[in-house]
Image (cartoon, grey):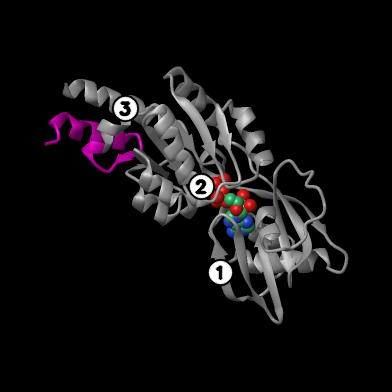
């Protein structure tokens, strides 16, 4: 049975916007040795802004943006919001689409009139056999647009760390915890954020199932793992970690499978929740 003090712990945590879904979670949280974090929307604000648009010959910038925005209308990903907003800000009408599919960790595809359009990352374009010849010099996140399997252009977007992210990572280090980033974004954009925040280890270009594998490796090598994420792509690893914590701003899928929710979506909720759990377990003994 769960000691009474665990209910007090759940109550104290909820006042700080930390939702422990059970008493068992508190027990597990107190044993955590490693903190694994998703990047976009977890460590970063997830409010991307479009910095520039690079088009290939034969397509206008407005046409490119209207195609990208048309597809991204179907996604709730932070990247999608930034592209839809950029179109709106430029009075650029999003193209209507049919047969739209979102491929988690990759992007979206669908049909606009007679054209088949893909919007997503470089890795996905290459996997689809779409040549992406230009070197990517943009240090942020690059989203590619392809029309009928030909590259049409690239949208350069940037995201910034949450205001409390660096301090939260410092607190985790002070608690003796190992801090790892697991992201579906590229090595370059991952490094840019990880270096700023002094994260110990970075794994980039991960698909949802790769995140799960990396988490399991860390657990075998270094002990119990807390994973914090926000996306649909984080659901498998949230479910598989010793403790899965979802950001309150995250997708329904993430919040449903997680056993802890950080209602304020602050990174500092992570060290706070571990401290609270340890205190609760001490009181129970
Ligand atoms: P993270 O793990 O950092 O939260 P995701 O796994 O959600 O990132 O996304 C990984 C990558 O997949 C993104 O960086 C982007 O390149 C691509 N991607 C995901 N969703 C979309 C989308 N709606 N539009 C374009 N690209 C996307
Ligand atoms: Mg995310």
Q: Earlier in the sequence, mark 2 or mark 1?
A: 1
Please state the horizontal and vertical placement of residue 97, each as a whole percent of the image.
63, 75
> Which quarter of the rendered picture does the N terminus lie within?
top left
Q: Which residue is mark 2?
A: 210
Mark 1 and ligand 1: say if the CB distance to the nearest ligand atom is below 8 Å.
no
Magenta span: 1-24
- Is residue 12 located in the magenta-colored stretch of the structure? yes
Residue under the image location 48 percent in, 50 percent down: 209
Whether residue 79 can be seen here: no
Out of 183 and 278, give the one closest to the viewer.
183
Q: Relative to residue 46, is residue 274 drawn left or right?
A: left
Q: For the residue labelled by badge 2, is the local secondary structure a helix, a strand or a loop?
A: helix
> Which quarter of the rendered picture does the C terminus lie within?
top left
Q: Which residue is mark 3?
A: 31
Whether residue 191 can be seen here: yes
| Residue at the bottom extreme, as displayed | 114
Q: Is the residue marked by circle 3 packed among few (<14), some (14-19), or many (20+) residues within 10 Å?
A: some
Q: Relative to residue 43, is residue 228 drawn left or right?
A: left
Q: Relative to residue 23, is residue 187 drawn left or right?
A: right
Q: Is the residue marked by circle 2 packed among few (<14), some (14-19), or many (20+) residues within 10 Å?
A: some
Q: Which residue is mark 1?
A: 101
Out of 90 and 103, give the one closest to the viewer.
103
Residue under the image location 56 percent in, 36 percent down: 162
Mark whose residue sits in front, 2 or 1: 2
Please state the horizontal and vertical placement of residue 189, each as a whole percent of the image.
67, 40
Cα distance in 3D space between marks 1 and 3: 40 Å
Q: Is the residue marked by circle 1 packed among few (<14), some (14-19), or many (20+) residues within 10 Å?
A: some
Residue under the image location 64 percent in, 54 percent down: 82
Q: For the residue labelled by badge 1, is the local secondary structure a helix, a strand or a loop?
A: strand
């Amino acid at each position: 049975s769960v000691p009474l003090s665990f209910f007090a712990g759940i109550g104290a945590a909820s006042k700080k916007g930390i939702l422990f879904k059970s008493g068992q979670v508190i027990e597990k949280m107190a044993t955590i040795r490693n903190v694994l974090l998703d990047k976009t929307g977890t460590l970063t604000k997830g409010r991307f802004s479009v910095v520039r648009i690079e088009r290939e010959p034969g397509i206008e910038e407005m046409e490119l943006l209207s195609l990208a925005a048309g597809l991204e209308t179907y996604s709730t990903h932070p990247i999608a919001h930034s592209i839809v907003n950029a179109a709106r800000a430029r009075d650029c009408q999003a193209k209507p689409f049919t047969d739209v599919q979102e491929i988690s960790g990759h992007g979206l595809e669908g049909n606009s009139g007679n054209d088949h359009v893909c919007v997503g990352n470089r890795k996905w374009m290459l996997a689809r056999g779409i040549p992406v010849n230009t070197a990517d010099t943009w240090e942020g996140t690059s989203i590619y647009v392809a029309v009928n399997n030909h590259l049409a252009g690239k949208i350069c977007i940037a995201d910034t760390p949450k205001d409390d992210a660096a301090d939260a990572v410092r607190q985790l280090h002070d608690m003796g915890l190992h801090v790892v980033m697991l992201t579906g974004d590229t090595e370059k954009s991952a490094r840019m954020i990880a270096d700023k925040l002094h994260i110990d280890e970075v794994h980039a270009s991960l698909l949802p199932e790769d995140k799960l594998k990396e988490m399991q490796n860390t657990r075998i090598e270094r002990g119990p793992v807390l994973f914090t994420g926000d996306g649909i792509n984080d659901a498998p690893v949230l479910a598989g970690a010793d403790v899965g914590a979802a950001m309150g701003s995250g997708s329904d899928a993430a919040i449903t499978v997680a056993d802890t929710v950080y209602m304020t979506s602050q990174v500092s909720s992570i060290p706070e929740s571990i401290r609270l759990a340890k205190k609760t377990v001490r009181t129970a003994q």
